[in-house]
Amino acid sequence: MATPFSVYLVDDNPWHVEPVRCLLDEEAFTLTHWHSPRDAWNGINESIASDLVILDLDVEGEGSGGLAFADLIDHLRVRWPQVPLIVLSGQLDTDTVMRSRTHDVRAVVRKPYDIRYLLTTIYGILRDGLDAHIHELNRQHVQLTREFHRLQAQETPVQTQVNRALQLLSRHFRFEEDFMATHAYPQAREHKAAHDKLLLHAQALTRGGAVRAEAIGRFWRGVESDINDDAGYLAYLEGIHEQLSARLLPR
Ligand SMILES: [Fe+2]
Ligand SMILES: [Fe+2]
C-alpha cells in the first residue's frame, strides 16, 4: 500500500529497528530496513529517493559488509543530494560531528536514545520537507502567473519567451507529479492526465510558428484551472502536515 512518507533505516540491531517500526504508523510511513552499509549501498542503487535516511554509524566489522560509512554517505549524497539524513551514534566525538557537518546531516542522535525523541526528530524533519515543497509549489505558481501575464501583454509574444514559459510549465508539472506519485496523493493519476492534456495543447500552440496573445490567453485559462485543481492537492498536503504536527512532542 502506498503511504505518504517513506523512511530508510540502516541498522544491524533488530532491537533498534523494531520499536521504530512499531511506533511509526504503518498507514502513513513505509519503513525500509537495511542491515548493513553494503545492503544500503545496493538498496540505494535500486530505489527511488525516500523522505529520510537514518544511519546507525556504529555498525562495524562483519556487520558493515566491508563498507565504511563515509563511503556510503558519499554515495548517498551523489545519488540523492537532497534527502535529509539522521545519524545515530554511541559516541559523539569531534570526528563524528565534523563528518556530519560535512555531509549536511540534519540531526545527530546519541545512543542510547529515547525512542520518543527519535520519532519527534523524524516527524520534525518530514514536516520541514513538506513545508519546503509547499513553499516551492506556491513560488512556481506565482512565477508561472507572472510569465504568462507578461506574454499576454504583447500582441505577438516573442517566440523564445513563449518557449521559456512552456518549459517552466512542463518542469512545474513534473515537480508536482513526482511528489504526488511518491506521497500517495489519491488523485495523482487524474491530475497527471490533466497535465498531459495541457502539454499536448502547448505543442499544438507552438506548431504553427508565431503565437498570438489571444491563443496564449486561452491556453493560460486552462493552466489556471489546473492551478485551481492544485487546491485539492494542497489540502491533502496540509492534512498530512497537520498529522505530523499532532505527533510532535511539545518542545
Ligand atoms: Fe497541477
Ligand atoms: Fe501547479
Image (cartoon, rainbow, N blue to C red):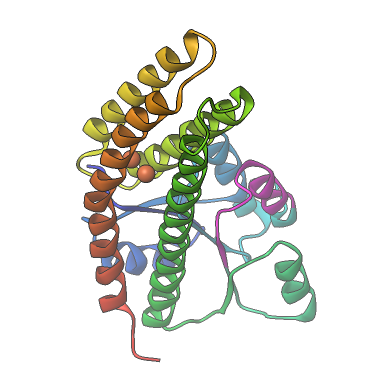
| Residue at image point 45% right, 35% down | 174
Place of residue 160 in the rendered image (x, y in percent of width and height, measured from the top left): 63, 26
In this picture, residue 29 sits left or right of residue 151: left
**Residues rendered magenta in the picture:** 71-86
Q: Quadrant of the C terminus?
A: bottom left
Q: Position of residue 30 (x, y in %)?
A: 33, 51
Looking at the image, which residue sits at the far bottom? 251
Task: Give how far across and how far down residue 32 sits, in percent.
Answer: 40, 49
Q: Quadrant of ligand 2?
A: top left
Q: Residue at x 45, y 54 (%)?
A: 51
Q: Is residue 191 shown above or below 233?
A: above
Q: Is residue 156 left or right of residue 225?
A: right
Is residue 28 visible in the rendered image? The answer is no
Furthest-top residue in this view: 208
Q: Is residue 48 above or below residue 111?
A: above
Q: Quadrant of the N terminus?
A: top left
User: Looking at the image, which is closer to me, 73 or 168?
Assistant: 168
Q: Is residue 236 highlighted in magenta?
A: no
Coordinates of residue 95 in the picture (x, y in percent): 79, 74
Residue 109 appearing in the image: yes
- The residue at 64%/48% (across/down) is 76
- Look at the image and say whether residue 78 sits in the magenta stretch: yes
Instruction: Note whether 48 is above or below 135 in the view shown.
Output: above
Numbered disc total:
0
Foreground of the two, 206 or 200: 206
Question: Residue at the location (30% across, 36% down)?
Answer: 221
Q: Nearer the viewer, residue 159 or 61?
A: 159
